[in-house]
């Protein structure tokens, strides 16, 4: 790489205003998802059409096997367990205990936020919306059924982000892509077991907000391992590029599936004539935006990684006391 194209020296997470702007953008998108899918009539009709198709294909259709349902239900917990294992191994191998504490706080914060939102945000059934099974009124639309955001999706995505925060900047693009794929596969499985697609998208946005807050802290407190030399390269193009590509393609595919199903007329008739295209759209709807968030996160964290010239010492802060060498690792993020 020529000097003209080499990254300039900089400290990690130097543009705090940009991190704050990212939090605000995610919060506004979350508000937009809530307004469309929970409050607008069009959004609620769309969600019902997607679930009618899933009901026809899985609950009473050719895929009605309890084994399949049990398998799909286990995916989020499997993702949580795998991400947790990677997290523990990384923390113990790299001895990034402060970063681990921040990442765990991020995970807990996202899940607490999701549970708090569940108690406040309730779906209301649109008037005159036909349903193929009267029990759907109780399954999905009863006032005491709270699902926004999805708790299972928050668990899976939160675990993925926790791993992303404790790995080094050179590993983040590939690890982020891998854990992001795990999270969106979990989201697709959650939809197939009976969740609204918007519940899963909302969970991803809640995790993204907390991921930005935790990421800023990790970079600020762990400057030593979040700073690369200007000659070191990260595979951000491979990780973020593939995530962006999948996000765009899968989001477009979800929208096209709605059109292939017959557009808005088919949504209004989903109870009487459910379309398999709606089943495809509902499965892909959380996956596409999830990968877009993954690509944005990888790109953003890479742009905020610290840089220094080879041989240039890190910025140091004056200490009022000497840390014993045997305890020095405890002060590394």
Image: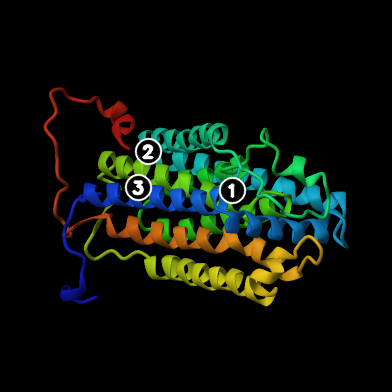
Q: Position of residue 96 (x, y in %)?
A: 38, 38
Question: How far apart are the alpha carbons under marks 1 and 3?
Answer: 19 Å
Tag of residue 199 = 1
Left or right of residue 37: residue 99: left
Q: How is the image coloured?
A: rainbow
Question: Which label sits in the foreground, 2 or 1?
Answer: 1
Q: Earlier in the sequence, mark 1 or mark 3?
A: 3
Of 143 and 313, the residue lying toward us: 143
Pick the quarter of the image with the N terminus. Answer: bottom left
Left or right of residue 270: residue 109: left
Determine crowd level at label 1: few under 14, some 14-19, many 20+ residues with C-alpha closer than 10 A: many
Question: Which label sits in the foreground, 1 or 3?
Answer: 1
Q: Residue at x 68, y 70 (%)?
A: 265
Question: Which label sits in the foreground, 2 or 3?
Answer: 3
Question: How far apart are the alpha carbons under marks 2 and 3?
Answer: 20 Å
Can the viewer see residue 293?
yes
> Is 283 located above or below residue 21 in the figure?
below
Of 268 and 323, the residue lying toward us: 268
Q: Residue at x 15, y 56 (%)?
A: 311
Q: Earlier in the sequence, mark 2 or mark 1?
A: 2
Q: Residue at x 11, y 32 (%)?
A: 318
Of 68 and 159, the residue lying toward us: 68
Can the viewer see residue 182?
no
Q: Position of residue 5 (x, y in %)?
A: 20, 74
Q: Position of residue 232 (x, y in %)?
A: 28, 63
Determine crowd level at label 3: few under 14, some 14-19, many 20+ residues with C-alpha closer than 10 A: some
SS at circle 3: helix
**Residue under label 3:** 23
Q: Position of residue 118 (x, y in %)?
A: 57, 36
């Amino acid at each position: 790489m020529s000097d003209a194209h080499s990254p300039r020296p900089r400290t990690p997470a130097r543009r705090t205003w940009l991190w704050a702007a990212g939090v605000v953008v995610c919060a506004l998108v979350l508000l937009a998802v809530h307004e469309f899918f929970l409050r607008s009539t069009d959004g609620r009709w769309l969600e019902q059409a997607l679930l009618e198709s899933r009901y026809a294909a899985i609950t009473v259709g050719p895929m009605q096997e309890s084994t399949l349902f049990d398998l799909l239900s286990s995916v989020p917990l499997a993702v949580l367990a795998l991400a947790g294992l990677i997290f523990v191994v990384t923390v113990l191998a790299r001895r990034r205990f402060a970063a681990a504490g921040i990442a765990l706080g991020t995970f807990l914060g996202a899940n607490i936020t999701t549970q708090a939102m569940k108690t406040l945000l309730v779906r209301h059934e649109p008037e005159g919306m036909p349903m193929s099974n009267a029990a759907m009124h109780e399954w999905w639309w009863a006032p005491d059924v709270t699902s926004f955001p999805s708790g299972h999706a928050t668990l899976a995505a939160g675990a993925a982000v926790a791993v992303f925060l404790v790995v080094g900047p050179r590993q983040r693009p590939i690890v982020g892509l891998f854990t992001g794929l795990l999270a969106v596969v979990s989201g697709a499985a959650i939809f197939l077991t009976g969740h609204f697609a918007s519940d899963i998208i909302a969970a991803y946005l809640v995790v993204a907000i907390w991921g930005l807050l935790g990421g800023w802290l990790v970079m600020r407190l762990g400057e030593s391992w979040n700073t690369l030399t200007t000659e070191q390269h990260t595979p951000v193009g491979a990780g973020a590029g593939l995530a962006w590509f999948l996000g765009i393609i899968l989001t477009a595919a979800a929208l096209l599936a709605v059109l292939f199903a017959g557009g808005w007329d088919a949504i209004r008739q989903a109870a009487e004539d459910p379309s398999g295209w709606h089943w495809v759209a509902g499965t892909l709807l959380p996956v596409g935006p999830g990968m877009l968030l993954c690509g944005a996160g990888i790109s953003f964290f890479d742009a905020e990684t610290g840089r220094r010239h080879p041989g240039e010492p890190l910025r140091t802060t004056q200490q009022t006391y000497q840390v014993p060498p045997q305890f020095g690792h405890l002060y590394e993020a």
